[in-house]
Image: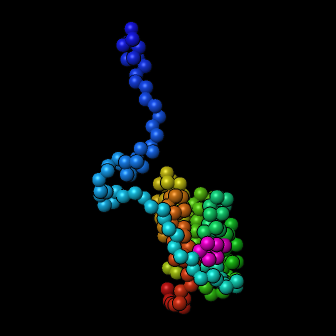
Amino acid sequence: MGRDRQEQQGIFTAPMDHSYRANMGGGNGNRGPRRPGFSASYPVVDPEPLPAPREDAASRVFAFVEDLFFLSKIQDTGRKMNVKVEFVKNEKELTERMKSNGEEKPSLIIFDLNNANAKPLTLIPKLKSKLKKGTSIIGFLSHVQGDLKQKAHEVGCDMVLPRSAFSQNLPQLLRRHGAIEADSGAAD
């Protein structure tokens, strides 16, 4: 009877404490030298912040983001990187803010592709034709939205990233596009 009972219930194993991996010298349990490309992951180091902008400096980065988590993440990262990011709700508001910048076009426009109020799939082609090559348009979305990613590329979005990759690369993106180029008068 005891054997029948064991076969019915299976063998019980306790939940595993993964601290043994640290004691074994890594994540895969091997004690020997690591193979290239299979090393432990290191924390991503943010790039150096840009020099602090003047108070009257024009914004070079605009964002169509209403999700409070990403809005605050972009604000905090912009503050750390000394990059002024302006949040806009629609095309009219973006146009007004760009007019106040004078001749300088934005360097980067960020779209939350799930922000229905901004109508990204209709607004992106308009912005691409108006701003030409001087402005990059980056969109972010959930990693499972393959169709939306394809549509965003088709309408002119320069780069479409999953939310996680966007978050991870945000400091580098803001630094690259927030910098004031010495040759800002260059032709498109």
Seen from this angle, which residue lies furthest front?
A: 23
Residue lying at 61% horizontally and 85% vertically, measured from the top left: 104
> Would residue 82 be counted in the magenta stretch?
yes
Q: Can you say whether 176 is above or below 166 in the image?
A: below
Residue lying at 41% horizontally and 44% vertically, measured from the top left: 20
Q: Nearer the viewer, residue 113 or 6?
A: 6
The answer to which quarter of the image holds residue 75 is: bottom right
Residue lying at 64% horizontally and 76% vertically, measured from the top left: 84
Q: Can you say whether 28 is above or below 65 in the image?
A: above
Label count reads 0
> Would residue 96 be counted in the magenta stretch?
no
Q: Do we see residue 125 in this rendering?
A: no
Q: How is the image coloured?
A: rainbow
Q: Nearer the viewer, residue 148 or 183?
A: 183
Q: Can you say whether 6 is above or below 80 in the image?
A: above
- Tell me where residue 11 appears, x and y as whole percent: 40, 24
- Tell me where residue 83 appears, x and y as whole percent: 61, 76
Q: Where are the magenta residues, as a range? A: 79-86
- Tell me where residue 188 appears, x and y as whole percent: 49, 86
Q: Nearer the viewer, residue 118 or 181?
A: 181
Q: Do we see residue 181 in this rendering?
A: yes
Q: Quadrant of the N terminus?
A: top left
- Tell me where residue 39 appears, x and y as whole percent: 36, 58
Residue lying at 70% horizontally and 85% vertically, measured from the top left: 56
